[in-house]
Image: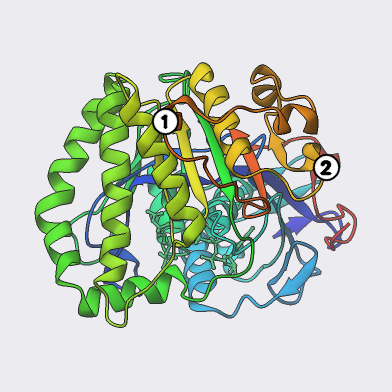
């Protein structure tokens, strides 16, 4: 290790998106390596609205690996962090920074300690896939710092060992996690199906139904399903292999009718597996069920489906609209049924707020004036559920990880490697 002085700090900062599965990963065949029982497919969400930023730093002055998440120091002793750090360190290469007079050899990386600071611009552990964006960002940023030569797919196999769904956040657009066959997990990695420009009509609206931490984590929930659900085994063997092929075809052809049918069916089957688990796991709540009914009724009243829905291990609804027009009609329906508790519309619809404007929603008076959706016109007046949704996030399919070269965006101080 060479440097003019031993006080240098070398850093890299990356930004990584989260993703939502349209064919769900639920069940592992290896708990430590995080190898799944089936392939899965996801859409990457626009990092302008939901993302993780992570700065990683190395310095001879650091005496242990340390990490700060959203400003608070957390322990790195967990097996998942340790596995990711070990795997990325073994792939590190020589690094030279002539300006700072730094030379780190491949062998040095085993002796040097790291500082890591990460920030999620959305609630952590609230069913919005913070672990996916978080581990993808950690691995991507370390890969850049350590001059790792591997491509994104190979990095995804490392991120997978932090959290399974994290492997799909190494790419933008639509992404497939190939389950692989090898016992050592070397072929269980993510590949990009199409980039974010391929199907750029799609608009995504997330209803954050509850941002409280959930009762059953995905990790323990899927373990219980593997142990007790026969439906899970049928799904993994018979359903997902065919459905994955159909989904790939639908994405390739931008065929929204098929995409919507497959997405809704797969979400519903994943929650059926949760119910088939002993004891049963309930991730969706009454609000989630109401959202499903509203979309099903609306889709059936149209010639073709307008919106697909999908739910992860929590009550939040992720709705994918076929285009901007459908998204404005969706927002009108959602605001009709779920008006905000307060008058602050600006914090009730976040992300791409122009969709609400296009829907003619500029203030509370517009929400109050919304007519009942036409598909319920002959029915008894519908009930409203004020306050049952915390807020909505409007977004779209987005790009994969990027390196942020502007030092002002770093979360660690370049002088001492401590959080800014
Ligand atoms: N930015 C981050 N960097 C590294 N690890 C993170 C980051 N954000 C979250 N994590 C890890 O992920 C854990 C939260 O994962 P968890 O699966 O409980 O929630 P989630 O990913 O937000 O929700 P879900 O998996 O249901 O979508 C945190 O306790 C932490 O270990
Ligand atoms: C329902 C899901 O979101 C489950 C995600 O599970 P995680 O990736 O959070 O689980 P671990 O691998 O144990 O960390 C479906 C999906 O994202 O495919």
Q: Residue at x 27, y 62 (%)?
A: 272
161 versus 336 height, above or below: below
The quarter of the picture where the N terminus appears is bottom right
Residue 146 lies, in percent from the top left, at: 59, 51
Quarter of the view holding residue 252: top left
Q: Are marks 2 and 1 in contact (CB under 8 Å)?
A: no
Side of 268 where 73 appears, left or right: right
Q: Residue furthest left?
A: 238
Q: Mark 1: few, some, or many residues within 10 Å (few <14, many ≥20)?
A: few
Mark sitting on residue 378: 1
303 versus 67 height, above or below: above
Q: Secondary structure at mark 2?
A: loop
Side of 269 where 62 appears, left or right: right
* Residue tagged 2: 343
Residue 407 lies, in percent from the top left, at: 82, 40
| Sequence-wise first label, 2 or 1 | 2
């Amino acid at each position: 290790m060479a440097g003019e002085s031993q006080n240098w700090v070398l850093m890299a900062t990356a930004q990584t998106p989260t993703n939502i599965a349209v064919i769900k990963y639920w069940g592992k065949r290896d708990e430590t390596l995080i190898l799944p029982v089936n392939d899965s497919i996801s859409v990457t969400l626009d990092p302008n609205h939901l993302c993780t930023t992570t700065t990683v730093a190395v310095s001879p002055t650091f005496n242990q690996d340390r990490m700060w998440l959203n400003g608070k120091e957390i322990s790195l002793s967990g097996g998942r962090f340790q596995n990711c750090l070990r795997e990325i360190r073994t792939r590190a290469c020589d690094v030279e920074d002539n300006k700072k007079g730094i030379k780190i050899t491949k062998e040095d990386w085993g002796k040097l300690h790291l500082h890591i600071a990460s920030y999620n611009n959305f609630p952590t552990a609230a069913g919005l896939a913070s672990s996916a964006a978080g581990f993808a960002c950690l691995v991507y940023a370390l890969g850049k710092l350590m001059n790792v030569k591997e491509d994104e797919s190979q990095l995804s196999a490392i991120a997978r060992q932090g959290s399974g769904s994290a492997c799909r956040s190494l790419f933008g657009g639509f992404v497939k996690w190939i389950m692989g066959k090898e016992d050592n997990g070397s072929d269980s990695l993510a590949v990009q199906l199409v980039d974010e420009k391929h199907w750029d009509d799609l608009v995504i609206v997330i209803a954050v139904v509850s941002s409280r931490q959930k009762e059953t984590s995905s990790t323990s929930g899927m373990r219980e399903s593997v142990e007790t659900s026969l439906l899970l085994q049928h799904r993994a063997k018979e359903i997902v292999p065919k459905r994955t092929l159909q989904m790939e075809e639908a994405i390739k052809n931008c065929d929204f009718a098929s995409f919507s049918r497959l997405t809704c069916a797969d979400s519903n089957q994943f929650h059926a597996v949760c119910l088939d688990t002993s004891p049963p796991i309930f991730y969706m709540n009454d609000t989630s069920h109401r959202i499903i009914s509203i979309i099903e009724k609306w889709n059936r009243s149209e010639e073709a489906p307008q919106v697909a829905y999908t739910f992860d291990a929590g009550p939040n609804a992720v709705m994918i609209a076929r285009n901007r027009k459908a998204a404005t009609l969706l927002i009108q329906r959602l605001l009709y049924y779920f008006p905000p508790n307060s008058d602050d519309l600006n914090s009730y619809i976040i992300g791409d707020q122009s969709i609400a404007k296009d829907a003619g929603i500029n203030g509370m008076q517009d929400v109050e004036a919304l007519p009942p959706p036409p598909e319920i016109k002959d029915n008894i007046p519908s009930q409203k559920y004020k306050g049952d949704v915390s807020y909505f996030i409007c977004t779209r399919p987005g790009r994969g990880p990027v390196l942020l070269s502007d030092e002002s965006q770093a979360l660690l101080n370049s002088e001492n490697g401590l959080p800014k």
